[in-house]
Amino acid sequence: MRKYLIAGNWKMHGSKVSIGTLLEALKKAKLTDKADLAVFPSFTYLAQVQQSLAGTPIRWGAQNVSAYEQGAYTGEVSVAMLQDFACHYVLIGHSERRHLFGESLQETAQKFARAQSSGLMPILCVGETRDERERGQTLTIIQQQIAAILALPAGIKVFSQAVIAYEPVWAIGTGLTASPQEAQEVHLAIRDFIAKYDANIANHLQILYGGSVKADNSAALLAMPDIDGALVGGASLQAEDFLMIYKTAAV
Ligand code: PGA
């Protein structure tokens, strides 16, 4: 059985004080072996998160990473730096990176490879825009985003140590959510696509849903057979809301 993962993407939100309060509340949660819990602060708060969460079962990761190993790359943060703060995961190709910062398919693949070769677990974010959905291109776009990663030398094996998050761009931060059936359809298509290369890897792959996940819609989404967790933005900034979502996975 696949374990659920409930991941909180804090994006460019928070302060030392607000994150301190959030962490204290999250630490009180009782985790079960049905679901993992992870948070993704901005780089500047990773030290604080590590200090607070070390020794707890809650994991943490970064929202982005450099495609380069080290060197004269002003403003970039390397995989080794993330490992210095005991990150377990890193988000790769979040739609805000792809669409607001022009991250290309090739860059997502380089970042993914860099992270994975050092033992960080990449969470590859994929998803279509509203226009692409309306043009019936949802699966084509997602397959392109996954194919860029499959083109890495290790091929399909890369997905034995990775997570995929399906996040329809039109559902992120908009209050619009894909219905559980709409999401399930895409999750199943992603799993089938991976299964064409390796059925066992597809079967073990965690596929998270993201896009306006809230405590009042998470249970229905997580009840779908191919939805293995949630990548939560807005609702992860309030401990109570985030833990309510966790509880819907952990029952
Ligand atoms: P949202 O963000 O829950 O605020 O829609 C999700 C995400 O971007 O990961």
Image (cartoon, rainbow, N blue to C red):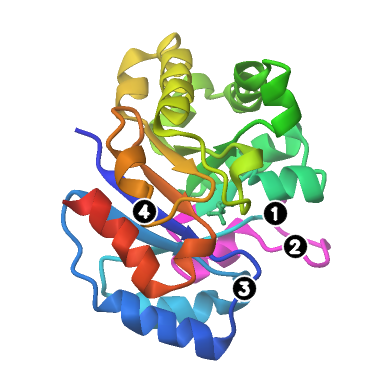
Q: CA distance from mark 1 to mark 3?
A: 21 Å
Q: Residues within 10 Å of mark 4 (few under 14, many from 20)?
A: few
Answer above or below: position of 12 versus 134.
below
Q: CA distance from mark 3 to mark 4?
A: 23 Å
Tell which tag, 1 or 3, sits nearer the viewer: 3
Say which amino acid is labelled 2: Glu
Q: Residues within 10 Å of mark 2 (few under 14, many from 20)?
A: some
Callout 1: CB less than 8 Å from ligand 1: no
The spot of residue 140 in percent (x, y) is 65, 16
Q: Residue furthest top?
A: 196
Q: Are marks 4 and 1 in contact (CB under 8 Å)?
A: no
Mark positioned earlier in the residue sequence (1 or 3): 3
The image's mark for residue 76 is 2
Q: CA distance from mark 4 to mark 2?
A: 37 Å
The spot of residue 61 in percent (x, y) is 49, 61
Q: Which residues are magenta?
A: 66-89
Q: Main secondary structure of the magenta part?
A: loop
The image's mark for residue 66 is 1
The image's mark for residue 13 is 3
Q: Is residue 67 visible?
A: no
Q: Is residue 99 magenta?
A: no
Tell which tag, 3 or 4, sits nearer the viewer: 4
For mark 4, what is the residue? Answer: 216
Q: Is residue 233 left or right of residue 13?
A: left
Q: Is residue 76 magenta?
A: yes
Q: Toward the viewer: 145 or 231?
A: 231
Residue beneath the point at 60% across and 43% down = 171
Q: Is residue 93 left or right of residue 224?
A: right
Residue beneath the point at 56% across and 50% down = 91
Q: CA distance from mark 1 to mark 2?
A: 6 Å
Q: Are marks 1 and 3 in contact (CB under 8 Å)?
A: no
Say which amino acid is labelled 4: Asp
